[in-house]
Amino acid sequence: MTIACSSVLVPGPKDYPLYHDSTNTQVLSAVATIHATPLPLGLAQPARVVVSPQSLHPLLNPGSATGY
């Protein structure tokens, strides 16, 4: 498979690698386990997340061509 652009990612404990780089050492794509069971009504409340430019810095990937 040819992928135009991809960044290295670190899968979490319940994620499964899908594609690796040509050396088979870096994960480029992964899938995650999700639970499709709906939460009981009233349990899930919307959360307000404030994002500042400083909080985005840890999310940037300097090894990527775009930085993201």
Image (cartoon, grey):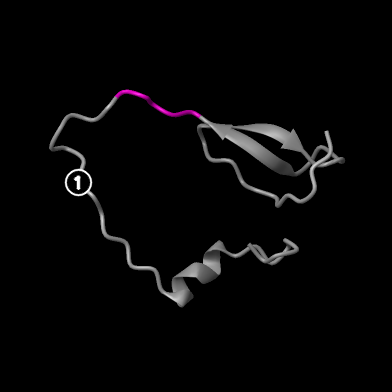
Residue drawn 53% across and 66% down? 58
Residue 15, located in which quarter of the rendered image? top right
Q: Where residue 43 sits in the image (x, y, percent)?
A: 16, 37
Check if residue 36 falls in the magenta segment.
yes
Residue at 13% of width from left, 37% of height from top? Answer: 42
Image quadrant in which the C terminus is located = bottom right
Q: Quadrant of the N terminus?
A: top right
- Residue at the far right: name it: 22
Q: Is residue 43 left or right of residue 31?
A: left
The span picked out in magenta is: 33-37
In the rendered view, would you say 56 is above or below 48?
Answer: below
What percent of the width, then of the height, locates residue 9? Answer: 64, 48
> What kind of secondary structure does the magenta stretch mostly adopt?
loop
- Describe residue 22's horizontal placement relative to residue 35 as left or right: right
Find disc 1 in the rendering and name its residue.
45
x and y percentages locating residue 20 in the rendered image: 76, 38
From the viewer's perspective, tell me whether residue 30 is left or right of residue 52. right
Residue drawn 68% across the image and 31% down it: 18
Considering the numbered disc 1 on the image, is that residue within a helix, a strand or a loop?
A: loop
**Is 50 on the left-hand or right-hand side of 44?**
right
**Which residue ends up furthest to the left in the rendered image?**
42
Quarter where residue 31 is shown: top right
**Residue 25 position within the rendered picture, expressed as x and y whole percent measured from the top left:** 79, 41
Which residue is at a point 73% across and 49% down the rendered structure image? 6
Q: Could you tell me the amino acid type at mark 1?
A: Gln
Within the magenta stretch, is there residue 32?
Answer: no
Classify mark 1: residues with Cα within 10 Å, few (<14), some (14-19) or many (20+).
few
* Circle count: 1
